[in-house]
Image (cartoon, rainbow, N blue to C red):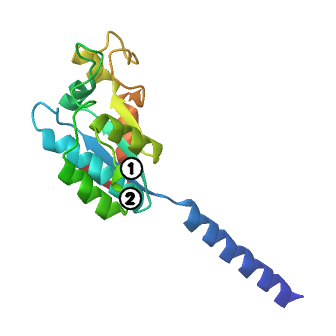
Amino acid sequence: MKRISILLITCFMILSFTQISFAQEKKILVHMKTDLGKDDAQICVAYNIIWASIENGYKVNVLIDASAVNTYKKGWFGKDKLEGYKMPESLRIELSKQFNVDLINIPKTYGDYLKLLHEKGAKFYINGAMLVVSGISDKFGDTSKLSTDLFVPIDLKKMVDLVKEADKYIAY
């Protein structure tokens, strides 16, 4: 009887540890801080690393912050600076090779690339206070002047939580 009890307890412990290890996800936070107008390479490269992180099994959170919030403000024709920005064909070909995806399935614009990343599981957050400070929003939580509804406005506490929860942190 004692052996059976020990065996059952051992099996329970092994199963418990296995479930714990499977439940823990690797998390990465990509912190996008630079406006497209200041350096167009920053955001473009960030999109690539977001996709690569997803493909490598990471749960990806993206924080749009600082001057990067201006990139997604609706302009004259209801679009932002990046939405219709065409991706270089050489980059599309390289992404096709690296991710083993047919070229036809690689986005042609950065607006489509953003949607693809969201569909693949990336979660996008935006500094709600920065939207107000930069004049994009009249009040916290207002995203009506952003070109996409993919961004969730968050406060400073949630921003800190995203950093604390991340196993890896990358800033652009």
Q: CA distance from mark 2 to mark 1?
A: 7 Å
- Look at 34% across and 30% down and name the residue there: 126
**Could you say which is closer to the camera, residue 74 or residue 140?**
74
Identity, as a three-letter code, of the amino acid under mark 2:
Val
Which residue is at 20% across, 49% downward? 89
- Which residue is nearer to you in this view: 7 or 49? 49
Q: Residue furthest left?
A: 38
As drawn, 36 above or below 91: above
Instruction: Residue under label 1, please give it.
Output: 105
Q: Is residue 51 left or right of residue 36?
A: right
Going by the picture, which residue comes out furthest to the bottom? 3
Question: Viewed as shown, does residue 148 lie left or right of 10?
Answer: left
Question: Where is residue 61 drawn, in percent x and y?
Answer: 39, 44
Q: Quadrant of the C terminus?
A: top left
Horizontal arrangement in the rendering, residue 123 relative to residue 90 (left or right): right
Front residue of 151 and 76: 76
In this rendered view, identify the residue nearer to me: 172 or 163. Answer: 172
Q: Residue furthest front?
A: 104
Residue 77 visible in this rendered orientation of the protein: yes
Q: Position of residue 86 (x, y in %)?
A: 22, 37
Point 40% across, 43% down: residue: 116
